Amino acid sequence: MTIERTRIKICGLTREQDVDAVVAAGADAVGFVIYPPSQRNVSAERAAELVSRLPAFVTPVLLFVNEPLENIQAACRLIPTAVVQFHGDEAPADCQRLGRPFIRAARIPLGDGAAFFDLVKYTQDFKAAQAILLDAHVEGFGGSGKTFNWSLLPPSVNAHLVLSGGLTHANVIDGILQVRPRAKTLAVDVSSGVEISKGIKCHEKIKQFVAAVRAADEQLARNHVRIPTT
């Protein structure tokens, strides 16, 4: 049995030095929140400035919440290499209308409520998505720093998943070991878990987080699962 290594996205970037630190640490994707109510919000123009610092093969991801299609299209024209992350109440048709690769967030209830979220159906409804991002369902959208109960997810989900919501270097290994066997592939997404304050990243926490993800991959490999290095 072979699996892909765990991909890493660091989200909520607002500063040049933090983008550089994320790249240096070895992250695969960098997320920018284009949602004015968020304390991590950046304009599309500011996101484009930050994206210009990214080397080849590091993917920019633009997060939107119930944003008009024309605004998303305008942002994508500024950042043509971006993947779009829909994090609001968007229907499948809304996501596909953009005609670009996209990630769809699934808001998983906290506590025992996770057992009642039909993730299998959700992934079928959004089968056109590159991946389904699993985040905790809290008031408002995103950035809660809360984890949902990973053990209550379905045992088998025929989709690429991104584990998010309250991850830190202290719990991401457990999250990967619990969720990876349930999915086609797994990536992880962190924001508040590597911050000093909202939108301001801690470079040491970024390094610790990436190291913890790699440690989880090594543990999977020790369990006789070969992980490609490329």
Image (cartoon, rainbow, N blue to C red):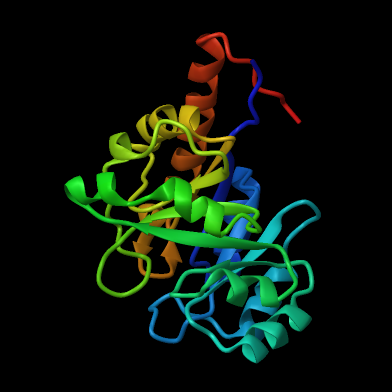
Q: Is residue 9 above or below residue 85?
A: above
Q: Which percent across, then down, holds residue 168?
A: 36, 45
Residue 83: x and y in percent read 68, 64
Q: Quadrant of residue 77?
A: bottom right
Q: Quadrant of the C terminus?
A: top right
Would residue 28 appear left or right of 8 to someone viewing this image? right
**Percent of width and height locating residue 6:** 58, 35
> Residue at horizontal 53%, vertical 85%?
67
In the picture, measured across the screen, residue 164 lies left or right of residue 166, that is right
Residue 8, above or below 40: above
Considering the image in quadrants, where does the N terminus appear? top right
Residue 199 seen in the figure: yes
133, 38: nearer the viewer: 133
Choose between 138 and 112: the one closer to the eye. Answer: 112
- The x and y percentages for residue 212 are 45, 33
Q: Quadrant of residue 99?
A: bottom right
**What residue is shown at x 57% (from left), y 89% (from top)?**
68
